[in-house]
Image: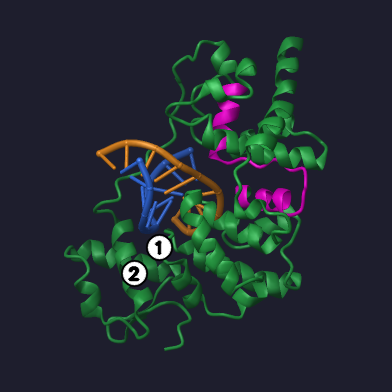
Chain colours: A green, B orange, C blue
Amino acid sequence: MRGAGEEKRRAGIPPRVIAWFAENARDLPWRRPGFSAWGTLVSEIMLQQTPVARVIPRLEQWLARWPSSDALAADSPAEAVRAWDRLGYPRRALALHAAAVAISERHGGRVPDDVDALLALPGIGDYTARAVAAFAYGQPVPVVDVNTRRVLARAVAGQGEAGPARTRVDLTAMQELLPSDPAEARAFNAGAMELGQTVCVARTPRCEACPIAELCAWRAAGYPEYEGPSAPRQARFEGSDRQVRGLIMRELRLSDTPVPADVIEGLWPDSVQRERALAGLLADGLANGSPEAGYSLPGSVS
DNA sequence: GTCCGGATAG
DNA sequence: CTATCCGGAC
């Protein structure tokens, strides 16, 4: 059972985060007034597994070339993957192109404002669907990324880490704090993420700069060591299949004609790992071809 | 070397 | 629920 003091403490969190965000929000492209829903969708997909600083230049190039979903849908998946360049996880580029096609075909070229319609698009999951609904359309739906999860784990649950993601639990926790007013809900969604990115960071949180330090359950408990299950650790990149995939993709992006099999062979000495990576790219639809014909990006003209 | 970041297939 | 999927900054 929750005490009255506990309720009061929790109720203080959103207004303080909102006030802090009003003063401390970074000036980012997707926060510009009039930024399009399409731009929001593109930026959120780019931000899925890529830090802000690396996204910004690529986003601006992307939107200059494809200012609408119709524009992207009219171009080839190969060009989308090429323009993605080295942002990483190129399946996102393929999914974004497929989402643009779906938006054109099913939604008349307008990015949908409904969470379920957004979730039905390729490459859009729980985070991105709610981020677009909240930030592009002002809907008061909870948006939870890894930073928000850490803020809630500390301030509300009194734990030092968030542990493995539990989507339903996380969304419920955010929903319970979310103001009903759409403008406040938007600011709290964005502010909680920003707080987690810039102040309530994983390793060395700057509690002296935190607007909710006096309300934080973790701080009140004396910063207890986290006991629960940890989020899984990312495997090494060097020598990984991901590195080999990246090398092959780089070769395909740079070539206007099919890349011969012997060129692929020269990219990585371990044939078992190389073939596994290539098979994975073919299965993902990021590459087309055969040992005889060579390999190309999907939907290439050549 | 370590850190950062959500979607999806099985 | 778990494994897979990138690459640049520090």
User: Does residue A183 lie above or below A59 as drawn?
Assistant: above
Q: Which mark is residue A187?
A: none
Q: Image height check: is C5 above or below A227?
A: below
Label at residue A250:
2
Residue found at x 61% / y 55%: A29
Subunit that carries the residue with mark 2: A
Is the magenta region chiefly helix, strand or loop? Answer: helix
Circles 2 and 1: CB atoms closer than 8 Å: yes
Instruction: Give the residues in magenta.
Output: A127-156
Residue A267 position, x and y percent, is 22, 69
Q: In the image as oriented, which residue stretches furthest toward the bottom? A: A302
Give the quarter of the figure containing the N terminus of chain A: top right
The disc placed on residue A86 is: 1
Q: Residues within 10 Å of mark 2 (few under 14, many from 20)?
A: some
User: Residue A294 at x, y = what percent?
Assistant: 31, 83
Amino acid type shown at disc 1: Arg
| Secondary structure at numbered mark 2 | helix
In this view of the protein, which residue sits in the foreground, A243 or A199?
Answer: A199
Q: In the structure shown, which secondary structural element does the residue marked by tag 1 occupy?
A: loop
What residue is rendered at 60% in x and 28% in y? A152
